[in-house]
Image (tube, grey):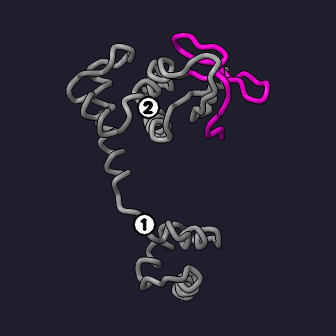
Amino acid sequence: MINYLRGKITYKDDKSLILENQGIGFKIFASPDILKKVVEGEETKIFTCLYLRETAAELYGFSTPKELELFEILNDISGIGPKTAMMLASLGSLERLKETMEKGELPSEIKGIGKKRAQKILLELTGKIKEIRKPFDTDEIDGTLDVLISLGFSRQRAKEVLSEIPDEPNQEERVKKALKALGR
């Protein structure tokens, strides 16, 4: 929803900072790495994720889009809250996080992850790494699959038909051929 904010850092403590943009001060929870880098009074750009709970709406900030993506992946793992996910995301990449956890060398700032929880996280991370490394589906990249789904066909049926159609450089031709096959 809010991908990044650019503005002046007006305040920071050991857990968060306030970034002023257009006269509005946004409280952003950030990792110790970011808090060390930013300087009060200077303008900066912070990539953010809005986390909504029943009782609060919180912004979490990251220095790169990669850290933000890692946060979103980690935050989806059950048993990991946004603050823990933020701390883990500060390690930079899924592979580096996995290596660090396998060695049992988590930073001291990351609290609440015992041996069993670490094993569970490692299992889920391994699955996420495999998922991310899957080759791209060309039907999804060129949007043909989305077109067929928007026309009311199931994802599974549309994928089956598209796998039988020879590759066409033109999306329109692929959609026409898929519709013919689906109409049989």
- Tell which of 41 and 32 is nearer to you: 41
Hey, which quadrant is residue 124 in on the image? Answer: top left
Task: From the image, tell me which residue sits under label 1.
Answer: 137
Hey, which quadrant is residue 33 in on the image? Answer: top left
Residue furthest to the front in view is 42
- Tell which of 165 and 25 is nearer to you: 25
Cα separation between marks 2 and 1: 28 Å
Quadrant of the image for the N terminus? top right
Q: Which residues are magenta?
A: 1-29
Nearer the N terminus, badge 2 or badge 1?
2
Position of residue 53 relative to residue 110, above or below, is below
Amino acid type, residue under disc 2 in the picture: Ser
Q: Nearer the viewer, mark 2 or mark 1?
A: 1
- Residue 128 in view of the camera: yes
- Residue 183 in view of the camera: no
Secondary structure under tag 2 reads loop
Q: Which mark is residue 78?
A: 2
